[in-house]
Image: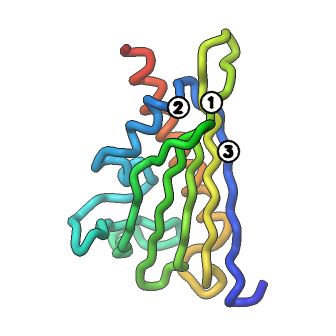
C-alpha cells in the first residue's frame, strides 16, 4: 500500500431497530461517544474535539482528535452520515455510515448498518488496521445497543 493511497476499512452489522430511530441517535451531540474510548471535550470552528484512548497506547495518555460530522441525510432507501477525523499520530480518515431498511427475523423493520472508513497515512500512524477495525466494530455494537434499547422502550 502506498502512503498516498487510502486504506479502506468496512464493517457491517444488523441492528434490531428501524433506520429512522437509529439515525436519530446520530443527530445528537452524544453520537461521538458511541465510538469506543472516545470522550467529547469541546467544539471549535464547526469541529468537535474529542479525546480517544487507542488500543496499544497507555490508558492515561489519550489522543486529541478533531472530528467533523454531518447529520444523517435521508436518501430514497437509507440514511447516510459522513464524517472526517484527524489528530496527531492518526491517519486522516473519511467515513460514511449507511443505515438501510432490512427485514427483521420476525417481520419487523430492522437496519442494515454499513460503516466504511478511508484512512490516509494509516501505515505511519499510532493506529493499525486491526485497531481501526476493532474501533469500527465497537462503534456499530454500541450504536446497535442504543438503538435496540430505545426500540424496546418505545
Please report the residue visible at 67 percent of the width from the left and 27 percent of the height from the top. 102
Residue 12 has which mark? Answer: 3
The answer to whether 2 appears left or right of 78 in the picture is right
**Badge 3: residue crowd in 10 Å (few <14, some 14–19, many ≥20):** some
Q: Is residue 49 visible?
A: no
Separation (CA) of disc 3 from disc 1: 13 Å
Label 2: which secondary element: helix
Dot 2 crowding, Cα within 10 Å, few <14, some 14–19, many 20+ = many
| Residues at circles 3 and 2 in contact by the CB criterion of under 8 Å | no
Query: Residue, x 39% and y 23% (percent of image)?
Result: 150
Pick the front one: 97 or 147: 97
Would you place residue 152 above or below residue 142 in this image? above
Q: Earlier in the sequence, mark 3 or mark 1?
A: 3
What residue sits right under mark 1 in the picture?
A: 101
- Residue at the image point whose x is 47% and y is 31% from the top: 20
Q: How far from the left and from the top, in percent, is residue 89?
A: 48, 84
What residue did someone put label 2 on? 19
* For the residues bearing labels 1 and 2, Cβ distance under 8 angstroms: yes
Identity of the residue drawn at 44% across and 20% down: 151
The residues tagged by marks 3 and 2 sit, at their Cα atoms, a distance apart of 14 Å
Identify which residue, 108 or 76, lies in the foreground. 76
**In x, y percent, where is residue 139?**
51, 49
Image quadrant containing the C terminus: top left
Local SS, label 1: strand
Q: CA distance from mark 1 to mark 2?
A: 6 Å
Q: Is residue 54 above or below residue 134?
A: below
Q: Nearer the viewer, residue 64 or 103?
A: 103
Question: Looking at this rendering, what residue extends furthest in the top direction?
Answer: 106
Mark 3 or 2 closer to N-term?
3
Q: Position of residue 149 (x, y in %)?
A: 42, 23
Amino acid at each position: 500500500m502506498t502512503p498516498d493511497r487510502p486504506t479502506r476499512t468496512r464493517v457491517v452489522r444488523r441492528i434490531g431497530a428501524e433506520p429512522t430511530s437509529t439515525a436519530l441517535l446520530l443527530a445528537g451531540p452524544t453520537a461521538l461517544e458511541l465510538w469506543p474510548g472516545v470522550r467529547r471535550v469541546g467544539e471549535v470552528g464547526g469541529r468537535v474535539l474529542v479525546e480517544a484512548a487507542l488500543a496499544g497506547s497507555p490508558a492515561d495518555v489519550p489522543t486529541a482528535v478533531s472530528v467533523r460530522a454531518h447529520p444523517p441525510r435521508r436518501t430514497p432507501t437509507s440514511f447516510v452520515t459522513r464524517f472526517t477525523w484527524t489528530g496527531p499520530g492518526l491517519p486522516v480518515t473519511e467515513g460514511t455510515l449507511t443505515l438501510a431498511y432490512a427485514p427483521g427475523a420476525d417481520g419487523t423493520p430492522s437496519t442494515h448498518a454499513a460503516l466504511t472508513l478511508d484512512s490516509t497515512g494509516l501505515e505511519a500512524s499510532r493506529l493499525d488496521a486491526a485497531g481501526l477495525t476493532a474501533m469500527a466494530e465497537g462503534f456499530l455494537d454500541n450504536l446497535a445497543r442504543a438503538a435496540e434499547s430505545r426500540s424496546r422502550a418505545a
